[in-house]
Image (tube, rainbow, N blue to C red):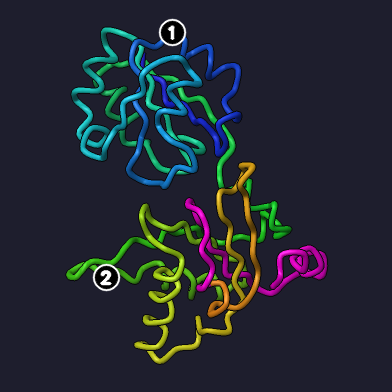
């Protein structure tokens, strides 16, 4: 059996159903290539009283080794947040079914519902996207296009920052693309909501302009929200985070 288990946003989010499955598992693998964890792999292992193996992208995407093990014993792939929202593992489930490996998905809280702590209404969010870290020969801009598309129909835009990416870097990417294209979709005075360690005791939420929030030093994982036109209740709630 292969279990895909969401471990939530905080160490204490693990469900009774998930714990029951984990106790049965002979191996625990932690998907560790899509998100900065607010706690360590060793902390997770101590919680379960078992060794946890970090799983890199190749191990999950080239899944033959994982699935062959799951044919013979109970294996768990632990995922920060929710296994099918925080990141996509549908391809893994599809491959498991092709190979006749039994699977079970155990859901948990993710950033997509924790962002309501900002006071922004969940049904007013548009397409969610990630901002990847740029490299010399890899500087994608599709995340900016999603912001523009969202702005046309007036929902909030949620950006998830890539592993290792700093907040000031992410904002600089948005500013550069907007400037290079001669557009005003994002500028230094664009209102932004920044969330650090959502759903944990370390959670911080800040609200100001892009140039001001870019100076913040916050613990990862970090999410960046560009709000659309605010309902008066949202506007009033956000005031507590303004600086």
The quarter holding residue 179 reads: bottom left
**What residue did someone put label 1 on?**
24
The quarter holding residue 31 reads: top left
Q: Is residue 32 above or below residue 28?
A: below
Q: Residues within 10 Å of mark 1 (few under 14, many from 20)?
A: few
Q: Is residue 68 above or below residue 90?
A: above
Viewer-closest of 207 and 45: 45
**In this picture, which residue range is highlighted in magenta?**
214-243
**What residue did someone put label 2 on?**
139
Q: Earlier in the sequence, mark 1 or mark 2?
A: 1
Q: Is residue 59 above or below residue 34?
A: above
Q: Is residue 31 above or below residue 241?
A: above
Checking the image for residue 217, the label placed there is none
Name the secondary structure under disc 1: helix
Based on the picture, tell me whether residue 219 belongs to the magenta stretch.
Answer: yes
Position of residue 207 measured from the top left corner of the image (x, y, whole percent) = 65, 69
40 left or right, relative to 240:
left
Name the secondary structure under disc 2: loop
97 left or right, relative to 237:
left
What is the tally of numbered marks visible in this picture?
A: 2
């Amino acid at each position: 059996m292969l279990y895909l288990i969401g471990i939530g946003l905080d160490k204490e989010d693990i469900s009774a159903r998930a714990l029951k499955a984990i106790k049965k598992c002979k191996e625990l693998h932690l998907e560790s290539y899509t998100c900065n964890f607010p706690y360590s792999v060793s902390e997770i292992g101590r919680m379960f009283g078992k060794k946890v193996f970090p799983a890199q992208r190749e191990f999950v995407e080239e899944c033959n080794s994982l699935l062959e093990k799951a044919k013979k014993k109970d294996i768990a792939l632990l995922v920060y947040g929710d296994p099918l929202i925080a990141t996509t593992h549908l391809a893994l489930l599809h491959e498991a079914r092709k190979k006749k490996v039994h699977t079970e998905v155990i859901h948990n809280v993710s950033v997509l519902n924790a962002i309501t702590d900002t006071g922004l209404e969940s049904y007013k969010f548009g397409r969610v996207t990630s901002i990847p870290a740029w490299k010399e020969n890899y500087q994608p801009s599709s995340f900016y296009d999603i912001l523009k598309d969202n702005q046309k129909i007036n929902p909030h835009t949620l950006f998830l920052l890539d592993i290792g990416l700093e907040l000031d870097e992410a904002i600089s990417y948005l500013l550069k693309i907007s400037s290079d294209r001669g557009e005003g979709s994002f500028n230094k005075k664009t209102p932004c909501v920044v969330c650090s360690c959502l759903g944990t005791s370390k959670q911080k939420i800040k609200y100001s302009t892009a140039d001001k929030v870019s100076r913040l030093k916050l613990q990862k994982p970090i999410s960046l929200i560009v709000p659309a036109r605010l309902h008066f209740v949202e506007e009033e709630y956000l005031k507590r985070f303004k600086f």
